[in-house]
Image (tube, rainbow, N blue to C red):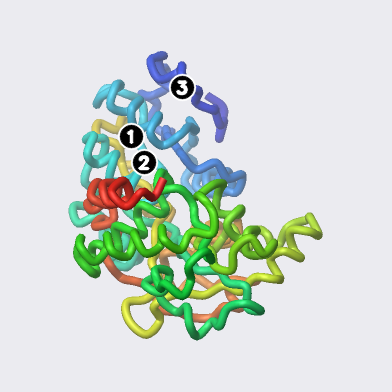
Amino acid sequence: MPLNRRIALPLAALMAGSAMASQAAAAEELNIYSARHYDSDAALYAAFTEQTGIEVNVLEGDSDQLIQRLKLEGEAGPADVLITVDAGRLWRGEQEGVFASVESAVLDERLPAYMHHPEGKWFGFSQRVRAIFIDPTEVDADAITRYENLADPALKGEVCIRSSNNIYNQSLLASMIAHHGEEEAEAWAQGVVDNFARDPEGGDTDQILGVASGECNVAVANHYYYVRLLNSDNESDREAAEKVQIVFPNQEDRGAHVNVGGAGMVKGAPHPENAVRFLEFLASDEAQALFATGNYEFPAVDSVELDGVIAAWGDFKKDDLNVSVLGENNPEAVRIFDRVGWR
């Protein structure tokens, strides 16, 4: 397979033989299954190959499809590394037994402890903040400084947020369970439902645009969707973003909820040494800078310099809850969403 070739994975391909199987025995290659679909990731693979001489083969697909494929292929499959986003999806892979534990002094030193799976089954390499967005002409920013404020009855009819099927929201609620317990987390979720401006619809960008258009005054979205609007080639996108103010919640207590883009070595990886070298490369300054510039994510390594909008935001407090807990609490979060009618 040519260097850095990226293949989309249709659902029908789940039962098909792997396109990479014939090359799995080659010593100087690495086979990656990736649920990230950013063009900037190609720069990561190219930089790794340039540094190591190891050819990178990439199979792209939906997270759940890739995890199912890995489960069907078993330990005799060609995959070395699985890359995906959100601790909830990493947890699903862990539950299906697709990850092998990795011990690495480099990863231990470079990455903060809360970005490690406790048994080294996966690691977080980029940080995604679930931020609050407000219309500053309609809402006092001092009144919405915490996620808990989203359930305040004073915001009835004001909140735009995605469906409970969205993994980002599932992980946010999972963090509320960890910090407050199941009963209080359910009361919070019910309060947010009571404050919906409309039935949940669309993606994160749509929630931000809902504030800009006046459909709602408060929204929840990952921070990088906002930066994309600010940096868009479309003038209307930029104008919409400029009407909205970002809030990093809970700065006076636990810090803003953080999720991850993460990766782990696949159990039975045919090139385990190359897999570990790649994971360690993802924690390097070069790779961390590419995460930040390519998709406006925050790097996992705090010492990496930032630029542009995310640098202008300056330092802020992030929740250091171990991200593995977000996956562990995911099933209860889904049950709570169902009970409170968050569809």
Crowding around mark 2 (Cα neighbors within 10 Å: few <14, some 14 to 19, many 20+) is: many
Q: Nearer the viewer, mark 3 or mark 1?
A: 3
Q: Position of residue 48 (x, y in %)?
A: 50, 47
Mark 2, residue position: 274
Quadrant location of residue 149? bottom left
How far apart in space, not on screen, are marks 3 and 2 (Cα)?
Answer: 28 Å
Residue type at mark 3 is: Leu
Point 55% across, 41% down: residue = 37
x then y, percent, for residue 103 = 22, 53
Q: Nearer the viewer, residue 211 or 246?
A: 211
Label 1 with label 2: CB-CB less than 8 Å: yes
Q: CA distance from mark 3 to mark 1?
A: 26 Å
> Label 1 is placed on what type of residue?
His
Considering depth in this image, is 130 or 59 the residue closer to the camera? 130
Name the N-terminal-most of marks 3 and 1.
3
* Percent position of residue 252, x then y: 37, 85
Q: Is 98 left, or right, of 29 in this rendering?
A: left
Tell me where residue 216 sits by quadrant: bottom right
> Which residue has dot 1 on it?
271
Residue 11: image tag:
3
N-terminal of the two: label 3 or label 2? 3
